[in-house]
Image (cartoon, rainbow, N blue to C red):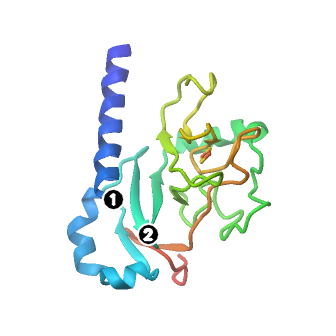
Amino acid sequence: MEEKLNSRRKVLIGMTAAVGASGVPFAAVPFLSAWNPSAKAKAVGAPVKVDISKIQVGQKIQVAWRKQPVFVIRHSAEALQNLSRLEDKLDDPQSINIDEPYRDINPTRSTSKEFTVIAGVCTHLGCSPKYYPEMEPQPWDEAWIGGFFCPCHGSMFDIVGRVFKGVPAPTNLKVPPHNFKGNILTIGEDKELT
Ligand code: FES
């Protein structure tokens, strides 16, 4: 069983690394080249479109918007249900202390019931937190049920980017403006709320 878990973990980590290395979700490459604005337009902050149809449950992909990493995570129903178990450990579970664009719409913090869209930039000093989705003890938390860990100074966030109490990061990870239309996620504008 342990061996099976280990190999599954390797697959998950491998997928994340492959996506992270390219900076663009593998499933979206042909699509993006056809739809996205020029590199110059993107540099000044034009919206980025992402085809989310190939993102697996539990997977995180990374895209670039305004030269910053943005994480898109597809959650299982079980993972979202587990979020309520964490409330006591979180510093700001309702995101009261930040400008939260889609407060109280979904537990995902996004306009989707299934996907979270968050800046991949630690709110302490700007490192990129790493995704550890497995529910298993970690060196930094014996009761880990999945989330993000920042390797720079040890900040912890849950799977929707809410910061734990007592860590260096002062606030939750930020949610960029976005909207979903069918299988297309647009990061950078929220006009087409669905
Ligand atoms: S930059 Fe993430 S904990 Fe310091």
Which-is-in-front pick, marks 2 and 1? Answer: 2
Q: Residue at x 50, y 74 (%)?
A: 179
Image quadrant in which you'd find residue 102:
bottom right
Which mark identifies residue 6? none
Viewer-nearest residue: 67 or 134: 67
Q: Residue at x 35, y 51 (%)?
A: 20
140 with respect to 84 (left or right): left
Q: Residue at x 79, y 60 (%)?
A: 97
Q: Secondary structure at mark 1?
A: loop
Residue 12, horizontal then vertical, whole percent: 35, 37
Q: Earlier in the sequence, mark 2 or mark 1?
A: 1
Task: Please say if 76 is above or below 54.
Answer: above
Neighbours of disc 2 within 10 Å: few (<14), some (14-19), many (20+): few
Image quadrant in which you'd find residue 119:
bottom right
Q: Amino acid at mark 2?
A: Lys
Neighbours of disc 1 within 10 Å: few (<14), some (14-19), many (20+): some
Viewer-nearest residue: 33 or 107: 33
Which mark identifies residue 67? 2
Residue 153, horizontal then vertical, whole percent: 61, 39
Which residue is label 1 attached to?
23
Viewer-nearest residue: 80 or 148: 148
Q: Is residue 128 visible?
A: yes
Residue 46, horizontal then vertical, whole percent: 43, 82
Residue 105, horizontal then vertical, whole percent: 66, 64
Q: Secondary structure at mark 2?
A: loop
Q: Residue at x 59, y 55 (%)?
A: 108
Instruction: State if disc 1 and disc 2 touch (CB < 8 Å).
Output: no
Residue found at the far left of this picture: 30
User: Which quadrant of the rendered structure holds the N terminus?
Assistant: top left
Q: Is mark 1 within 8 Å of ligand 1?
A: no
Q: Amino acid at mark 1?
A: Gly
- Residue at mark 2 to residue at mark 1: CA–CA distance: 11 Å
